Amino acid sequence: MSSQHPIYLSRWLLSSLGTRMFVEGEDRIPRHDSVLVASNHRSFMDAPALMAALDRPLRFACHHYMGEVPVMREIVTGMGCFPLDTPERRNQSFLRQGTELLSDREAVGVFPEGTPPMVTPTHPAQVGKFHRGFAHLALQFACQHPRNAIAVLPVALVSLQESNFRSIPIRLLSFFDPSEPLFDRSGLHPVVVYHHLVVAVGRPYWITQRDRQRYRGTEARRVVSMLATTCRTEIEQLLAKHRGEDALPTS
């Protein structure tokens, strides 16, 4: 399969859904070094939108159940995603697979909010709590490969106009992943379709030698927290900037 296939597929999906997408900050995208893209997450369209906007294949970490559901499994792997392991081995799986991809100078995509915004309706400007696994990945990789430059790139998906639907019962997903507590709830799975989307690229955070030293020492937790907070704040600011008071209403 061509490395460009996921990009073509992403563009086809956006076009078929009639999504108008605009990209801001393209000059900030690292083109040749290892990069970890961190973005907010509300829709099945998020990964394709990021790939089409950044014009670079992205290997996305996705939930374990996506690799278990027939048809969905073929779609996500065809898009270059790598489903994570079961919860008890999820962190190790993420760090191992992510490090292997970054060492090949591939771009890895993560949604630090995890599953909650996908199964719980959220406001387009809302950003949930960030899990810090992506920060550990970037810093661990930088320590293991000191000669390889790596940047963490925060990107905001700014929905200015969208439609919201309900699909399958959320509890149905527990058949594929009974270990996920979020699937043990009533109601239908929300589906967000973007009509007008801005992909706002934030300032890349390049891991420095000082970051490596702090991560190896007693300040590991502090530098991880700083990196996660920096990315979340950047995304929040980009969302606030583009939505503003004149944002188009959602439908």
Image (cartoon, rainbow, N blue to C red):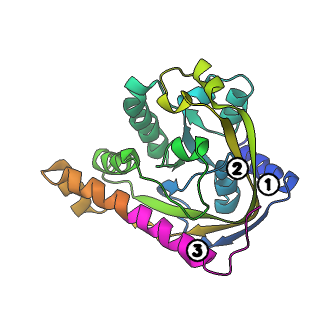
The residue labelled by disc 3 is 27
Mark found first going from the N terminus, 3 or 2: 3
* Image quadrant containing the C terminus: bottom right
C-alpha gap between disc 1 and disc 3:
22 Å
Q: Dot 1, crowdedness within 10 Å: few (<14), some or many (≥20)?
A: some
Q: Nearer the viewer, residue 237 or 202?
A: 237
Amino acid identity at mark 1: Leu
**Residue 77 location in percent, x, y?**
66, 33
The residue labelled by disc 1 is 14
The residue labelled by disc 2 is 45
**Span shown in magenta:** 230-251
- In percent of the image, x 43 and y 35: which residue is there? 94
**Residue 135 magenta-drawn?**
no
**Residue 87 location in percent, x, y?**
42, 27
Residue 132 as seen in the image, left or right of residue 168: left
- In percent of the image, x 65 and y 35: which residue is there? 187
Amino acid identity at mark 2: Met
Q: Is residue 61 above or below residue 36?
A: above
Amino acid identity at mark 3: Asp
Inspect this view and state whether residue 106 appears: no
Q: Nearer the viewer, residue 125 or 19?
A: 125
C-alpha gap between disc 2 and disc 1:
8 Å
Residue 145 as seen in the image, left or right of residue 223: right
